[in-house]
Image (cartoon, helix red, strand yellow):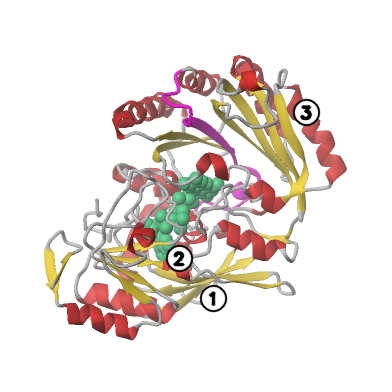
Amino acid sequence: MIDFRTAQGGQVALEQERLDGLRAALRGSVVLPGEAGYDVARSLWNGMIDRKPAAIVRPAGAADVMQAVNFAREHKLLLAVKGGGHNIAGKAACDEGLMIDLSAMKSVRVDPKAKRARVEPGALLSDFDRETQAFGLSTPTGINSTTGIAGLTLGGGFGWQSRKNGLTVDNLVSADVVLASGECVQASAEQNPDLFWALRGGGGNFGIVTSFEFRLHALGPEVLAGLIVYPFEQAQGVFEGYRAFTAKAPDDMTAWLVLRKAPPLPFLPTQVHGTAVVVVAFCWLGDMAKGQELAAGLRGFGKPVGEHAGPMPFTAWQAAFDPLLAPGARNYWKSHDFKALDRNVERVVGDAVAQLPTDECEVFIGHLGAAVNRVAAGDTAYPHRDVEFVVNVHTRWREPSQDSKCIGWARGLFDALAPHATGGVYVNFMPEDETQRVAAGAYGPNYARLSKLKATYDPENLFCLNQNIAPPGRATAR
Ligand SMILES: Cc1cc2nc3c(=O)[nH]c(=O)nc-3n(C[C@H](O)[C@H](O)[C@H](O)COP(=O)(O)OP(=O)(O)OC[C@H]3O[C@@H](n4cnc5c(N)ncnc54)[C@H](O)[C@@H]3O)c2cc1C
């Protein structure tokens, strides 16, 4: 017998033959504790999360996902779904439940003539970039190439191309979805349009996507991008310059700020390593000469202590932050949306950065606006269409003994920023303990419609391990 936890918090024991039956029905595999591949399949990016499912299904295609969903529903099992395993909340794995690990489904197929890509849900951004850039095409995704395309898309998705071409969901043309009933349907503007609306920001609440179809845009293969590094002592000037620069930035230009201790990067003098710095990270997608002219302005916020910028392959720029955001570290993140970065925000962030609890902790300020905000809040489940900046508190450390110090620092900074923020939050940047922020913070005006659609597509809340949207009148999963 194999013991499983049920979605309602109870226990159910299944005979080995039932698992054998599931195994026999799949083109992919079932992996049990102790079997080869179990630990890799259950591992997540956030080293704080160490969950041990009773069984892991590794589907080879949509038919396997349908089998696994039917199996979970029929036995009322607690069900977790893993795309790239990057989500900070770590809900892609569960203790004693059934986990569906989609990482074997990685295909990315580009139709260059139609400018479309068909992408399976186990693909990482690096897989997507490699295949699409072979044709000089792309679509907006995130800034760290080891992130999974599935979770990123279902929450919204933004990065270096978003100011020009919108969110990832704004470029989703259709999706194949396995519903809680086990049926596989297509969602698009024409087919199941309500479901299509909900998928564009509603996370994993409505079904398991087995294929995404994206609209592609011409890009690169080279972009003008890089890092300009200022000493932390010049933060005030950098914020001033940054505010003025971003207020006038064209859609082709995106500039983020990163405040942290300088890593030992070869282009920085050794005496700067380990000291607090403010980094301007930028990417220009337009004409190179025009971009060079514009980027010169980013060097005038103070006296930079180092720079690594110039024309480079977009795929290289997409991987630029990978070493700093490698999997395995303990992580606790907090996030707020902002319409403007006023002096209060600057002061609060500055005070916190003066007391970074570890050398890996950082504050990331993401630059949105432009095309992202030219979509109405009700057009997709993702509602934050008036946000110009996202401030992310990335708390990273190695030792469990540092948990309370690091988490305390993140919460302190989050609380101090709250009075200046919109109150909204990007669902993909929420840690596990923010269930209370899902309705008002992550979805706001769109929550009521999402909750009604949850009742249509997943009335029993089979897909509960996510930032959970409950059907009306039911409690959300914790
Ligand atoms: C280092 C780092 C950098 C990041 N940078 C960015 C960024 O630049 N821009 C941005 O927008 N976001 C960014 N994110 C956030 C990222 O979008 C989310 O963490 C996202 O959930 C990751 O997707 P995943 O598939 O890897 O995650 P997973 O942890 O595998 O999945 C997250 C959740 O999505 C659901 N899910 C996954 N696959 C499916 C599927 N096929 N069908 C239905 N539901 C599914 C499940 O509920 C799961 O719990 C970053 C995260 C990290 C850790």
Asked if residue 372 is among those painted magenta in the image, a careful observer would answer yes
Badge 2 element = helix
- Which of 238 and 230 lies nearest the eye of the viewer? 230
- Which of 187 and 225 lies nearest the eye of the viewer? 225
Q: Amino acid at mark 1?
A: Glu
Name the quadrant containing residue 437: top left
Q: Quadrant of ligand 1?
A: bottom left
* Residue at screen point 26% across, 64% down: 33
On the image, numbered disc 3 is attached to which residue? 297
Residue interval drawn in magenta: 355-377
The answer to whether any part of residue 74 appears in the image is yes
Q: Position of residue 433 (x, y in %)?
A: 30, 42
State the CA–CA distance, disc 2 to disc 1.
Answer: 29 Å
Q: State whether residue 90 is above or below residue 236.
A: below
* Residue at screen point 32% across, 45% down: 432
Badge 3 element = helix
Q: Position of residue 218 (x, y in %)?
A: 75, 60
